[in-house]
Amino acid sequence: MKKVVFLLAVLLTALTSVNAQKNYLTGAVSYTKATDVEATYSVSPTIGHYITKHVSVGLTGEFGKNGDAKTSNFGVFGRCDFANLGKSCTLWSQLTLVNESATLAGVTKNEFNANLG
């Protein structure tokens, strides 16, 4: 799974480089290690494509580990930009549909979520 997500991120980065005006790639990487505690990590890439000047669609995902729990999710989203605050800041609203999976002690739990924000 990690190899697939990594290859997808590399591919999406290449696609973003081709036409930077209509595509975007964002995400986050988190790693925490404390004394006497297992390390936790999370990687969450997002790629989008503007289909009009203010509307974009895209893919989002996340995988990580927190102690004994492993999590992953994959989803699609639609985003609408509705206010520009200067040259580099935009307010937007987004609808996301996500399939989430978590495994703890050999038990896997799957959920489907819809989020509007």
Image (cartoon, grey):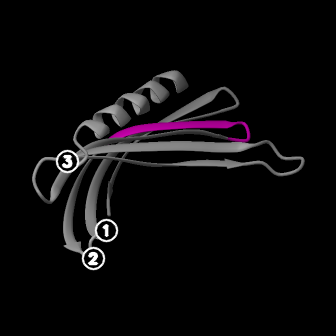
Which amino acid does the dot numbered 2 rest on?
Gly
Q: Residue at x 42, y 33 (%)?
A: 9
Residue 2 in percent (x, y) is at 54, 26
Q: Which residue is mark 3?
A: 22
As helix, strand or loop, the secondary structure at mark 2 comes to loop
Residues packed near mark 1 inside 10 Å, few (<14), some (14 to 19) or many (20 plus): few
Q: Is residue 109 left or right of residue 41?
A: left
Q: Are marks 1 and 2 in contact (CB under 8 Å)?
A: yes
Residue 101 in percent (x, y) is at 50, 35
**109 vs 33: above or below:** above
> For residue 88, which numbered disc appears in the image?
1
Whole-number angstrom distance, CA of label 1 to CA of label 2: 6 Å
Which amino acid does the dot numbered 3 rest on?
Lys
Q: Is residue 78 left or right of residue 69?
A: left
Residue 103 in percent (x, y) is at 61, 32
**53 vs 25: above or below:** below
Which amino acid does the dot numbered 1 rest on?
Ser
Q: Which residues are magenta?
A: 66-76
Considering the image in quadrants, where does the C terminus appear? bottom left
| Disc with the residue nearer the chain's start (3 vs 2) | 3
Q: Residue at x 89, y 47 (%)?
A: 36
Choose between 29 and 110: the one closer to the eye: 29
Q: Residue furthest bottom?
A: 85
Q: Residue at x 34, y 32 (%)?
A: 14
Look at the magenta stretch and give its main secondary structure: strand
Whole-number angstrom distance, CA of label 3 to CA of label 1: 15 Å
Q: Is residue 45 magenta?
A: no
As helix, strand or loop, the secondary structure at mark 3 comes to loop
Q: Which residue is mark 2?
A: 86
